[in-house]
Amino acid sequence: MTSTNRNRELLLIFFAMLVIATGFVLTALNTGQPVATALRFTGFLAAIFIAIHIANRLFVSTAEPALVSLVAFITGLGLVMIWRLKPELAAAQAVWLLLGAVALVLTMLTARRYQKFKDYKYTWAIAGVILLFAPVFLGVERGGARLWMDLGPVSFQPAEIAKLCFVFFLASYLEEKRRLLSISTKRAFGIWLPELKHLGPLLIMWAVSLVILVLERDLGTSLLFFGLFLAMLYVATGRPFYVVLGTSLFIAGATACYFAFYHVQVRFDIWLDPWLDPSGRGYQIIQSIFAMASGGLAGTGLGLGNPNLIPAVQTDFIFSAVAEELGLLGSIAVILAYLLFISRGLKIALTADDEFGKLVAAGLTSVFALQTFVILGGTTKLIPLTGVTLPYMSYGGSSILMNFILLALLLTISAKRGERGE
């Protein structure tokens, strides 16, 4: 079983690298960049993921085999697009991928007894709150949202680290309180409800999400953290009541913020009608829509479109560049890769042999799924535009590092299941 899983993983990595090599060479030929550079990037990526594969054989030999190959495909395509869009940033992204691989291996080594993390639940909570609200006081505003902090030449999003802290805290808290949260003692409007005091965490997270929306001016981060809480609460209790109540509270709170705060109103108005300010605030989303429309079914071809007309295309709008140059078919392939990653993550959560591991895997997968939905929804105008990055694909160091750590944790939890022959 162990050998079969790892052999399958190696084969899938090989196919992923074959696709990425083709992408690099086509980009070089169509943009006039050196083919030798394209091959060097391909070799570099292949070396990183072969090294990760070797680490898997050594430390998590029974882990889920599909995750690494999916990440290889997504990160590889992301690097192809960054090299095509902003060649000067490709080398920096490659360095972040290398650091991400190192972080993955270190996480595997330190998280093999991940159950001990639940002993520090309030430490995780305090760290998460500090990181989440640090940009309000020490951060810089970009694109209308206050999510970034600068440390000399390096910029990062503290929320990327905070989401992992909250996953550990919520997993620890919900494992301890899940029975109390599952018990209904009162009936109102035909619905059985738990004790009012047990609704406290739901109301606190609701309030925190609204504070994020108001102070950091970002719906995406607010939705991400509140959605994470609701998803983990549902996994722990199996009660859809919490999801319905939480969603209703979030919609009501966001509506109130729309009427109370001007910057929230501007965000929603531009989402509803970007033509209100086509050369200003609406310019970015309008260019994104044009790019995706011009891609058609098969795309313009790598290096043959005009995605550089979109501001911040290498971060917030990299999916729009994929849609323009690879078309609907390429976009579907990317979305399917994300959906497969999410499905494997949920399978790991369902089959984990300890309650804490189930909740951590469910939380990690939920935050990954929510972040993917938020950025894809923003670029396609399904929801208001946000400042979060597309996992593994967008340019950005903090996102790459945290998502490789997320991958390592999922692999470690799945390996525990495999060690018992499941």
Image (cartoon, rainbow, N blue to C red):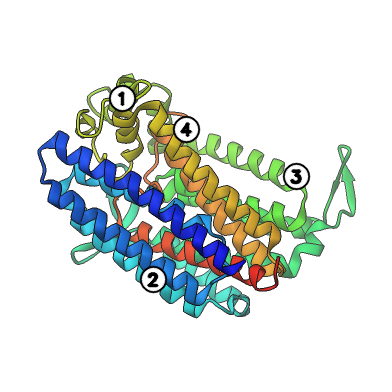
Q: Secondary structure at mark 4?
A: loop
Q: Secondary structure at mark 1?
A: helix
Q: Which residue type carries mark 1?
A: Ile
Task: Give the tally of numbered discs.
Answer: 4
Q: Which residue is mark 2?
A: 103
Query: Where in the figure is residue 205, as x and y percent of width and height?
Result: 60, 55
Query: Which is nearer the N-term, disc 2 or disc 3?
Result: 2
Q: Is residue 222 visible?
A: yes
Does residue 393 appear to the left or right of 243 in the view shown? left
Q: Is residue 133 visible?
A: no
Q: Which numbered circle lies on residue 240?
A: 3
Q: Which residue is mark 4?
A: 383
Q: Which residue is mark 1?
A: 286
Task: Give whichever of 240, 54 is nearer the camera.
Answer: 54
Q: Which residue type carries mark 4?
A: Ile
Q: Secondary structure at mark 3?
A: helix
CA separation, marks 3 and 1?
A: 37 Å
